[in-house]
Image (spheres, rainbow, N blue to C red):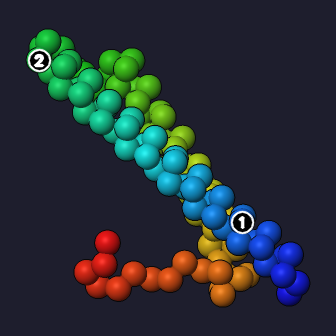
Amino acid sequence: MKLRESIHKAAQIVWYRQKLANVTRKKEKVFGKLGRTYYELLKKNDENPLTHPAISSCIHQIILFNEQIGKLQEELDELDRAFPALKKPARLKGEK
């Protein structure tokens, strides 16, 4: 493999990892919003907070993020299989 191709593939892998981290972070924020909204609705004695539009919206966003994460992970796995030398090394026990 030429050096140029290796650099391009490494850049692709980095991009997919960054995109995956960003989508995961957005999903975590929506989970937080979901929890806060649910708690607020419970405090207001809403009879069934799960049917509230804000809760439905959060759940829908989480589903979309999960689909996006799945696609990104598939692409990243495919690149990792095609170029194992560029694969991110596994962390050692106790390493953060």
| Label 1 neighbour load within 10 Å: few <14, some 14-19, many 20+ | few
The quarter holding residue 40 reads top left
- Viewer-closest of 65 and 79: 79
Report the residue at 52% width, 47% height from top.
Answer: 23
Q: Nearer the viewer, mark 1 or mark 2?
A: 1
Q: Quadrant of the N terminus?
A: bottom right
- Disc 2 is placed on an element classified as helix
Taking 79 as reference, is 92 left or right? left
Taking 39 as reference, is 85 left or right? right
Q: CA distance from mark 1 to mark 2?
A: 48 Å
Q: Amino acid at mark 2?
A: Lys
Q: Amino acid at mark 1?
A: Ala
Q: Give percent across and percent down for residue 59.
A: 41, 34
Report the residue at 45% width, 83% height from top.
Answer: 90
Report the residue at 66% width, 67% height from top.
Answer: 13
- Viewer-closest of 23 and 53: 23
The quarter holding residue 85 reads bottom right
Asked if residue 35 is positioned above or below residue 71 in the image, the reply reads above
Q: Identify the disc placed on residue 56.
A: none
Report the residue at 65% width, 86% height from top.
Answer: 84
Question: Circle 2 sits on which residue?
Answer: 43
| Total numbered labels placed on residues in the image | 2
Question: Circle 1 sits on which residue?
Answer: 11
Asked if residue 96 is positioned above or below residue 68 in the image, the reply reads below
Asked if residue 74 is positioned above or below residue 56 in the image, the reply reads below
Q: Give percent across and percent down for residue 95.
A: 31, 78
